[in-house]
Amino acid sequence: MFFSTKLICFLQIFNLLTIHVHGEKTEDATEEVKIEVLHLPNECDLKSKRGDLLNAHYDGYLANDGSKFYCSRSEKDGHPKWFVLGVGQVIKGLETGMMNMCPGEKRKVTIPPSLAYGIHGAGKIPPNATLIFEIELYAVTQGPRSVNTFKKIDLDQDKHLSRDEVKHYLMEDFKKDGKPRDLVREDWILEDIFKKNDHDGNGLISAKEYNVYQHDEL
Ligand SMILES: *[C@@H]1O[C@H](CO)[C@@H](O)[C@H](O)[C@H]1NC(C)=O
Ligand SMILES: [Ca+2]
Ligand SMILES: [Ca+2]
């Protein structure tokens, strides 16, 4: 269980929402995410925040014709999705739309194209599409991208994660979980991790590139 949450934070690949808006800097400042709370649980001691690991089901609709383009319930195993909030793993509108949300809460979030897939669209999403997501949040846990995890991966403590360090960490995780070690798969995962995280392309993931927290503990 713990294994899967940790690994998933690294993978960031398997769901549709990982698609990023391509090169759009023309955000209309007047465009905002609209949040409607459909259900609020009576008790809520932990609200979602940046860096948290969330578990949720979400259905995505196109606002203009109401057609459903995504449903996590009917995907693969139909399990709720795990993802980290605030690290660019989901589209911007969802990052905002899922902040301060309680476990058990249901929301309808309307996202303008500038905070979704922009003027080009992506896959099933047409250009300039306003999106509506119906989200049910199941769990909020402290994210795996913590300072402690970074320090654990950074074996030589130089505040940068090399491929070897990340690979070592993944191998240990695979071992812990008793999974067969499929090297091809691991290399592919590694490539993906660096593609998603090594923003300046220098082959190392710096604390800044990795860390979702804004304080400077590293
Ligand atoms: C999308 O919106 C942009 C900016 O408003 C516009 O220039 C473009 O023509 C639109 N594209 C489509 C396919 O409607
Ligand atoms: Ca290092
Ligand atoms: Ca880097």
Image (tube, helix red, strand yellow):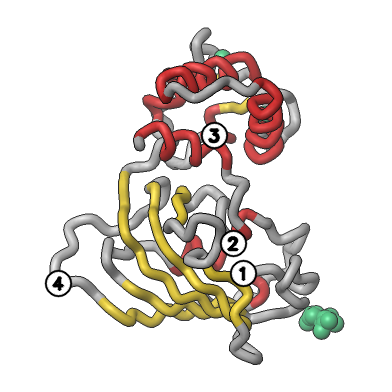
Q: Secondary structure at mark 1?
A: helix
Q: Quadrant of the N terminus?
A: top left
Q: Secondary structure at mark 3?
A: helix
The answer to whether the beta carbon of the residue marked 4 is less than 8 Å from any atom of ligand 1 is no
Q: Which residue is mark 4?
A: 42
Q: Which residue is mark 1?
A: 115
Give residue 76's position: percent from left, percent from top.
55, 57
Distance CA(mark 1)–CA(mark 4) = 31 Å
User: Which circle marks residue 180 in the picture?
Assistant: none
147 over 31 or under it: above or below: above
Of all residues shown, which one is farthest toward the bottom? Answer: 65
Q: Nearer the viewer, mark 3 or mark 2?
A: 2
Q: Which residue is mark 3?
A: 210
* Camera-nearest residue between 218 and 178: 178
Mark 4 neighbour class, 10 Å CA radius: few under 14, some 14 to 19, many 20 or more: few
95 over 42 or under it: above or below: above
Q: Secondary structure at mark 2?
A: loop
Evaluate if marks 1 and 4 touch, with contact meaning CB atoms under 8 Å apart. no
Among the 4 quarters of the image, the one containing residue 176: top left
Q: Which residue is mark 2?
A: 91
Amino acid beneath label 1: Leu
Q: Earlier in the sequence, mark 3 or mark 1?
A: 1
Residue 191 makes an appearance in the image: yes
Amino acid beneath label 4: Asn
Q: Nearer the viewer, mark 1 or mark 4?
A: 4
Q: Earlier in the sequence, mark 3 or mark 4?
A: 4
Q: Earlier in the sequence, mark 1 or mark 4?
A: 4
